[in-house]
């Protein structure tokens, strides 16, 4: 059956709502980020019409080609690996960077942001690799808290959440990793209060993609990053 993007967005919302209810959570607690890599401006605009209000791109290059044709006020996050030499362009294009996984990158962002007049600190997520895959980027879970401590020395960024990258495998086998992410998220939330961290405001737990978002929501995700399930299979 061929579905329109509008139908796909509605179906994804229904599936999220059911997963949230299974976990005794409110469906409204879960926000969708549309992962728009490889998608055209026309496809993205259709998703916005269907109610999507947050998108993520993987490269500065692709964002540069598309964002000028999208509403200025649309919230846009960087979800791909960010190279140090693209930091300057990235902070202009994106409202938040979800893929911060090193002190070097956090510091480079802070330095770039110090040149820009802003009312609020810039939002970053720390990217975590809970399954310990060697090929993937992301911090080992035990390095997240030390990096947050270091980030307290910076002036222009604030950690608003965690983003998890999981291996592509049977979602049920990922459940313990999703759960561990939730526990880390809550631990950091508590630590932020106890230690009075000024550069932390743990709000978002970004985990779950098209093949595993229902398990992620059952385990506590409040931001899911969906591509295929909203737009259909990516062309090879
Ligand atoms: C592409 C991508 C997604 C969405 O992937 P789908 O499997 O198509 O839902 C989510 N997060 C990141 C970082 C991505 O690169």
Image: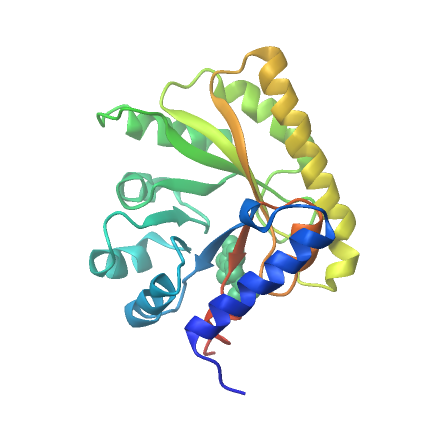
Judging depth in this view, the residue of 40 and 204 nearest the camera is 204
Image coordinates for residue 215, horizontal then vertical, percent: 70, 56
| Residue 99 to residue 228: above or below | above
Image coordinates for residue 92, horizontal then vertical, percent: 26, 41
Quadrant in which the N terminus appears = bottom right
| Residue 148 to residue 197: above or below | below
Q: Relative to 73, is 75 on the left or the right?
A: right
Judging depth in this view, the residue of 202 and 26 nearest the camera is 26
| Residue 28 to residue 236: above or below | above
User: Residue at the spot x=30%, y=28% of the render?
Assistant: 113
Which of the 4 image quadrants contains residue 90? Answer: top left
Farthest residue toward the top? 195
Farthest residue toward the bottom? 1
| Residue 60 to residue 193: above or below | below
User: Residue at the spot x=73%, y=54% of the render?
Assistant: 22
Image coordinates for residue 93, horizontal then vertical, percent: 28, 46
């Amino acid at each position: 059956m061929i579905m329109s993007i509008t139908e796909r967005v509605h179906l994804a919302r229904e599936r999220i709502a059911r997963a949230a209810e299974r976990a005794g959570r409110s469906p409204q607690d879960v926000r969708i980020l549309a992962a728009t890599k490889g998608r055209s401006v026309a496809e993205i605009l259709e998703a916005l019409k269907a109610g999507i209000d947050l998108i993520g791109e993987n490269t500065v290059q692709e964002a540069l080609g598309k964002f000028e044709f999208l509403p200025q006020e649309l919230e846009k996050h960087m979800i791909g690996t960010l190279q140090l030499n693209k930091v300057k362009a990235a902070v202009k294009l994106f409202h938040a960077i979800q893929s911060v996984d090193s002190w070097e990158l956090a510091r480079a962002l802070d330095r770039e942001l110090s040149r820009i007049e802003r009312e609020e600190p810039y939002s970053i997520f720390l990217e975590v690799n809970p399954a310990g895959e060697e090929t993937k980027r992301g911090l080992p879970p035990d390095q997240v808290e030390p990096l947050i401590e270091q980030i307290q020395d910076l002036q222009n960024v604030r950690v608003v959440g965690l983003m998890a990258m999981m291996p592509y495998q049977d979602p049920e086998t990922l459940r313990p990793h999703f759960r561990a992410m939730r526990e880390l998220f809550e631990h950091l939330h508590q630590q932020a209060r106890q230690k009075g961290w000024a550069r932390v405001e743990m709000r978002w737990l970004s985990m779950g993609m098209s093949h595993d978002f229902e398990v992620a929501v059952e385990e506590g995700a409040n931001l899911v990053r969906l591509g295929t399930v909203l737009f259909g299979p990516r062309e090879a």
